[in-house]
Image: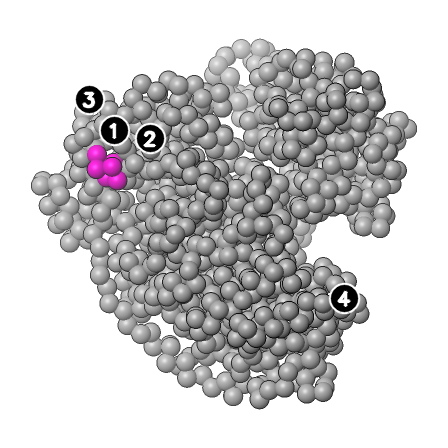
Amino acid sequence: MVAYFGINAMKFGVLNFPGSNCAEDCFHVLDKVVNQPTRYFWHQETNTTDLDAIVVPGGFSYGDYLRPGAIARFAPAMDALKEFVEKGKLVIGICNGFQILTEAGLLPGSLIKNKSVKFLCQDQTIRVENAKTPFTQKFHKHELLMTPIAHNEGNYYIDDEGLAELEAHHQIIFRYASQDGTVDDSTNPNGSVSNIAGICNKSFNVLGMMPHPERNAESLLGNAQGIKVFESMILSFTNSGN
Amino acid sequence: MKPLWKEAGLTQKEYDLLLQHLGREPNPTETALYGVMWSEHCGYKNTRPLFKNFPTTGPRILQGPGENAGIVDIDDDQVITFKVESHNHPSAIAPFQGAATGVGGIIRDILAMGAKPIGVLNSLHFATPKGKGHTKWLISEVIRGIGDYGNCIGIPTIGGEVRFAETYRGNPLVNAMCVGLMNKSEIQTASAEGPGNSLMIVGNLTGRDGIGGASFASKELDETNQEDRGAVQVGDPFMEKLLIDACLEVFAKDFVVGVQDMGAAGIISSTSETASKAGNGVEIDVSLVPTREAGMSPAEIMISESQERMLLIVKQGREDEVNAIFHKWDLHAVVIGNVTNDGFLRVKEGDVTVAEIPAASLTDAPIICRVGKVPDYLSKTQSFDESSVSLPDDMNATLQKLVSSPNIASRRWVYRQYDHMVQTNTVVRPGGNTGVLRIKGTQKAVTFSTDANGRYCYLNPKEGSKIVIAEAARNHIASGALPIAVTDGLNFGNPEKPEIFYQLEQSILGISEACRVLDTPIISGNASLYNETPDQGAIYPTPVIGMAGLIKNVEHITTKPFKRAGDVVFQVGDFSNEIGASEYLEVIHGKISGDVPKIELALEKRTQDFVLNAIQKSIINSATDIGDGGLAIALTECLYETKFGASIEIPESSYRLDALLFGEAQSRFLLSVAPDNMKTFQSYAEQSNIPISKLGIVNSSGNLRVRYQGESVIEQDVTTLESMNEATFPEMMR
Amino acid sequence: MIKASVTVMLKKAIFDPQGMAVKHGLDSIGFKNIDDVRVGRQIIIQIDSNDFGHAEEEVKEMCDKLLANPVVESWSHTLELMQ
């Protein structure tokens, strides 16, 4: 057995759909970088009892055919995931995972084609808008992270009413920004409403984000700022007395 | 009426040989099968005699050419496997699908070796777009096709190149390379061992896609081909992703004795190749092949190029277990026949035998020995008088023009459309000297690149080809890697023309010599001939070199950008007075002429060893090779994405100033060294008998200043140069 | 057999980047009188039934559940009898 982080390690599940091509990347970070017990959670599975958190990874579940996330949401694992969320456990959806969570109605809004109509893969500065969530408590408010994005449909859409509600409940977690922290149209890579890069549900136990924190979790790959997302989750688990 | 064998693309001589093999007249199905298998695309009949020149062995080489891809030992029981392949003709006609399926096909070659694909690269050659025309559409569709496939499948596109020359206007080049990683014990072979074992087809249904694609790829492009669109296959990256995941799971068990991907000429090619490799026969029942369309003839089923299919040779009795794993991934593995011991490829439709051919005869296309002739243009270009070229008045304007020229401009617009980070191994991303991938769980990294220089190879097929190899190796050295092996994609015109055959032959000789001296054996490759159009004739001879390097410790990874103000800038290698064949001569003076720069391979090797050793001594802060656009361009590239400037003084010489600034003298690197390490570096160079010149200092001015003979010759704001360098592609493709 | 032809479009209020790109493309090849372009997708479904009422209900359910995302998309459809 590997010596895990802390005494009461947090058990992660990485939801794996056919076509989820970032599942291994997330698994690697959880298992080898933050040293938590981790297993794949297969899309046909329904038993989540051993898990404390679930990562819905990026990729192209079901080829993104029809619409990103549209087919994935009917998998048996998604019903289990909904119950898991209702129990208050943590779920993070990254990129395609975010798209799946909106399709499944676990997060509001939707992700449509980038304004440029092109796939976009690059380092992107994002700004932490709410540092009081289980996913961001190791950051400080307005901290800037350089986190890779890689998507075709990352253009977050929500209507005005929905946006007002997100604002009112502080559910906007990350915004696209410039390297000096400015948030405006020129720092918006994909056309997202209000530069939104990541949001939480009202209970703050579900986070969806387009940037890939698992891609900047090791300094060899550029920077390790993304690791704090996972460390925040572990901290909140530890603090909750588990 | 044309006889059937002529329709199938066979010559009289080939048909006579076929009759000898069979001892009887072939039926139409058999004729069609020979037609595709003996096409240039499958049979390499023009190139095989030349391949004998290639060095293909070495202490690290576990598998040279002859399998789906070659294998190189990277220590610790790990191996890498890689190969480059062309998809030029399909991409000319349907650029999105052509490029996408080119990527898909090469990935399956790597998968068939038993390896997990860890990276893809490409080499793309186009004419520069004119206005809103066809070329712009072609470029954007090819790039979208590559991105769409690689992004969906989750394999990072870690490098590549886009180069422009008018010669590719009607015949673009789209070459794709894939790299895989595995343990030694996981290597699979493409061999149909064990009579009685089952042939299983997995993946997509078989349709009429790409019927005749293999022979179609061996024809010159003309107007009538535009109607051949049915011959272009359609890619399904999601299916391929499932195939990879499922195959790797199956390979981990002990069920499979042989694997072959189904590329050109589909079932016929994969079954006859695996059978003849094992010295066995195979029997296939086409009525068992799951088809997408009704009414397909046995010949159509056998030669269909439907994508995302693999052939597995499965141990007798293990078929159900294999199928169970595929079923988990929503796929089916279907038995379509079995291995026999009589050496025949027998095709049945139910109980009726529709073809019966000695399997080995299909994979042994008759070789055509040709004789080359020196092309006429060479005497003219080689006698070009460089002294007739006048020096530009303003080197600043010259630099700006070069920085924003299509072959030198930033490719960010391209590679940001490719996911180059998935799998979280990419340490150095596209835009660097090479793509660098760390290997998880080790201290190692591997480097990959693709390089070509059509203009060099056109102006001097042999020496130009040597330079392409040397330049590729320099990129790896500058990354801190030892170059270890090569894959070659040979893109040429019609070899039946003696001048083209000369280019092909000389190029292969040049590549062979350079690979021998630089110790980078050739482990796999591909030839794409007949790259011609009626209007423009043949393309430049364009060998594409895919190279791999090994970095034993990630600490040695070195990159282009200058790292610290105060560091000392050195050139390794000597200046020369050459401007022939250069990017500068074409862009600034509009001339594609002259001879390529002189390359001395022994010196090249010594220089490369010196630089790599210096990097491994941890005394080098940044490194790049000096290539297209010469020293001035190399300097700008070391300044981009930094806040630095540099103050450079070119050493006094008798050479022309443009040759000093923009000439492409070979065997050179541009390095930066911390002041504390300068003495060590200089004395090491002296010991190694390698010429170095101290050029200047990195500073924080944000300006590039170059002086010569006491006068300022270049004074440029780096931000301005960088934005010009970045603007070219977005503007050209808008 | 009934052929259902479903058209899914981004809702009017939502900016359609694909439509914009196509408009730009048309403009650049000389079609200057284009007011608006919107890109959607068409899904053809063959239903093994001759009962239009039932097919109608099924198609509606398919669209609501899977074929369209009600947050951003609207859909329309036609049904015809296949020979």
For the residues marked 4 and 1, what is the alpha-carbon distance in whole angstroms?
A: 66 Å
The magenta segment is B275-280
Say whether disc 4 or disc 3 marks the residue closer to the N-terminus: 3
Q: Which mark is residue B194?
A: 1
- Give the camera-side residue of B700 and B263: B700
Q: Identify the residue at image location x=58%, y=40%.
A: B440
Which residue is more in the foreground, B611 or B415? B611
Q: Please state which amino acid type lies under the numbered disc 4.
A: Ala
What residue is pinned by disc 3? Answer: B351
Give the spatial CA distance, label 4 vs label 3. 79 Å
Q: In the rendered image, which quarter is residue B114 located in?
A: top left
Q: Amino acid at mark 3?
A: Asp
Q: Report helix, strand or loop for mark 1.
A: loop
> Element under label 2?
strand
Label 2 to label 3: alpha-carbon separation: 27 Å
Categorize mark 3 by other alpha carbons within 10 Å: few (<14), some (14-19), many (20+): few
Badge 2 is on which residue?
B257
Closer to us: mark 2 or mark 3?
2
- Badge 3 marks a residue whose secondary structure is loop
Of the image marks 2 and 3, the number of the one nearer the N terminus: 2
Query: B653 and B387: which one is in front?
Result: B653
- Say which label, 1 or 2, has the lower sequence index: 1
First reached walking from the N terminus: tag 3 or tag 1? 1
| One can see residue C67 in this view | no
Q: Report in which chain the residue with disc 1 lies.
A: B
Label 4: element kind: loop
Q: Chain of mark 2?
A: B
